[in-house]
Amino acid sequence: MTLLSVLGVISSAIFSGTSLLYTTLGEVITERSGIVNLGLEGVLLVSASTGFAVASLTGNPYLGVLAAALAGGLMNLILGYLVVTRRGNQLASGLALMFFGFGLSALIGKPYVGAKIKGLPRILLPGLQELPRLYASLFRFDLLIYLVIPAAVLVWWLLFRTRWGLGLRAVGESADTAFASGRNPWLIRYQALFVGGLLAGLGAAHLSIAYAMNWTEYMTAGRGFIAVALVIFSKWHPLRAIVGALLFSAAVAFQLLLQSSGIKVSPFLLDTIPYLLTLLVLIIWGGTRKHAAPASLGRVYHGTE
């Protein structure tokens, strides 16, 4: 494998991992409040289709990013109504949201299948201009890529260095105790869902507006479920999520490299490599983690109104 191939895998991993990391960060916030969102796949699809549609209509990719983020936040509020206000089962509500997202995204995106948009502009960091053009082109990234690591640090700071984060984690551990201390578990969970949806929307926007620059149905290809798995892998910690997202996206880039190299293995088998890696990591990691999950994760909070 040549140096150019290695750099190509790294560059591809960064591009494909950005949408996954934003989504994982959003799910970390959501699950820290005690809610697991199995409807993430539907949230991503609606956000991706909405962002692409707005970018196509306005010709402005940044407006598309904002629209995708808002769509993700609103989709998560639907889940909030189901599981917080109506006290529905979180797993069943999440699956219902996912199927709703499948249909709604197909409806929103249908007029834009095959449409062309102006994607997010790519910027070369100062100092890389001295590299040969072929190498420098591999590291010309868009704004969402440059912001994803600061976003992970910001989420870490919000969760572990602010009163809001303390309250959110308290609700995730014991909503009754948090309520007794003067916090409002319903409001905090709604806030966590909306912020988590905004981040997932940013991930979906990067997928459709910056990475693929097109819209096709089910283009997320299971990223919502992978994000839920990566939250477990990261032990509900936003900085560890960076490693998980890069690991999965590197596996995706590697199997694409193998396919392009002409290796005599079925491409369908190679496509399973990232997902097999995810399962393997969860099997190994699941046996070593020590009660990292929030104690109230998945539980309905009835409280007293």
Image (cartoon, grey):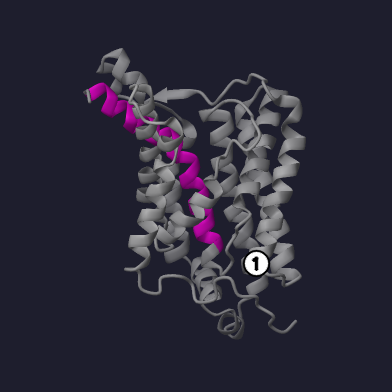
If the image is split into quadrants, where does the N terminus sit? Answer: top left
Residue 208, relative to residue 166: is it above or below?
above
Residue at mark 1: 90
Quadrant housing residue 90: bottom right
Q: Give left or right: position of 285 versus 74.
A: left
Instruction: Specify the farthest residue to the left.
Output: 2
Quadrant housing residue 38: bottom right
Q: Is residue 18 magenta?
A: yes
Q: Position of residue 16 (x, y in %)?
A: 45, 36
Q: Position of residue 204 (x, y in %)?
A: 58, 40
The majority secondary structure of the magenta stretch comes to helix
Residue occupying image coordinates x 64% and y 41%: 45
The amino acid beneath tag 1 is: Gln
Q: Is residue 198 magenta?
A: no
Residue occupying image coordinates x 37% and y 48%: 277
Residue 206, relative to residue 25: is it above or below?
above
Residue occupying image coordinates x 54% and y 69%: 168
Residue occupying image coordinates x 34% and y 34%: 254
Report whether residue 161 is seen. Answer: no
Instruction: Specify the farthest residue to the top.
Output: 133
**Element class at badge 1:** helix
Disc 1 packing (10 Å; few <14; some 14–19; many ≥20):
many
Quadrant housing residue 260: top left
Range of the magenta residues? 3-30
Report whether residue 247 is seen. Answer: yes
Q: Give left or right: position of 304 versus 248.
A: right
